[in-house]
Image: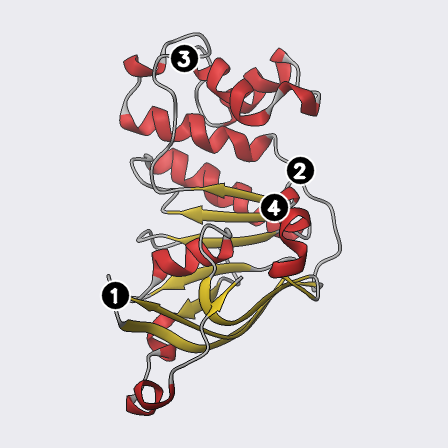
Amino acid sequence: MTSSPVNTTLLELKQLTCERDQRCLFTGLQMSLEGGDIVQIVGPNGSGKTSLIRLLTTMSSDYQGDILWQGQSLVDSRLDYLNHLLYLGHLPAVKKALSARENLAWFSGMSQGHTQLDLDKALAEVGLEGFENVPCYSLSAGQLRRVALARLHLTPARVWVLDEPFTAIDVQGVKRLERLLAEHAAGGGLVVITTHQTLNIPGIKPLNLLDFQADEQYYENAEGWHNG
């Protein structure tokens, strides 16, 4: 579990503008994301939630403005940032031919020093005790999601970017995940999340992309796209 100072700025979004298919999704996005924060990206479909996730995970560099990691532009600090990032996407990304334990070993990398006991404990934490050796093609959608979420119990990453992590999770699984996110933040970690779930976690900071929609002046002046 992360144990780092809270209230330390980890990521800064500086006047971010993102365009897709000749349409501006958001512009002038400005926010500091600190250790201890749980930031929920909100907005209707098409408002740019997925595009912002792609920027925050460095899968895309098609933006104007800058993203800073601990005061340095991601253009210069990308590798260091990725060493501190765990991203879980909308799909569980589980290899169905492998067992739950084998998937977790592959995800975490045995080079990190995790033992079979560590892996089995992580699976038990997400409610998969007794399913360690079951091939994932035999698991339900909710169980596949839990295999992916078990990574959160093993990673030293300080920044978690989670895209709809509550999909197919039952009520008890939701409570467990909420508790884990709160613990990560309390230890100085940063959580950035998209979800349709109403979260029962105090102090969540909303990032509403509707607050950063473009006006007509943008279309008259837009230029200088960053492709770092």
**Left or right placement of residue 157 versus residue 91 in this view:** right
Position of the C terminus, as image quadrant, is: bottom right
Report which residue position mark 2 lands on: 156
> Of helix, strand and loop, which one carries label 2?
loop
Q: Position of residue 180 (x, y in %)?
A: 54, 41
Report which residue position mark 3 lands on: 98
Q: Which of 125/72 is in front?
A: 72
Q: Earlier in the sequence, mark 4 or mark 2?
A: 4
> Of helix, strand and loop, which one carries label 1?
loop
> Of helix, strand and loop, which one carries label 3?
loop
Q: Which residue is painted at 35% across and 86% down in the image? A: 218
Query: Closer to the observer: label 2 or label 1?
Result: 1
Q: 10 Å neighbourhood of mark 2: few (<14), some, or many (≥20)?
A: some
Q: Which residue is painted at 53% across and 63% down in the image? A: 203
* Gap in angstroms between the C-alphas marked 2 and 1: 37 Å
**What is the tally of numbered marks visible in this picture?**
4
* Gap in angstroms between the C-alphas marked 1 and 4: 28 Å
For the residues labelled 3 and 4, say whether their Cβ atoms are less than 8 Å apart.
no
Q: Position of residue 87 (x, y in %)?
A: 49, 43
Amino acid type for the residue under numbered disc 1: Asp
Q: Which residue is painted at 33% across and 51% down in the image? A: 197
**Left or right placement of residue 92 versus residue 77 in this view:** left
Q: Which of 20/47 is in front?
A: 20
Q: 10 Å neighbourhood of mark 4: few (<14), some, or many (≥20)?
A: some
Amino acid type for the residue under numbered disc 2: Pro
Report which residue position mark 1 lands on: 21
Q: 10 Å neighbourhood of mark 1: few (<14), some, or many (≥20)?
A: few
Report which residue position mark 4 lands on: 82
Taking 42 as reference, is 109 above or below it? above
Q: Which of 202/11 is in front?
A: 11
For the residues labelled 2 and 3, say whether their Cβ atoms are less than 8 Å apart.
no
Q: Earlier in the sequence, mark 2 or mark 3?
A: 3
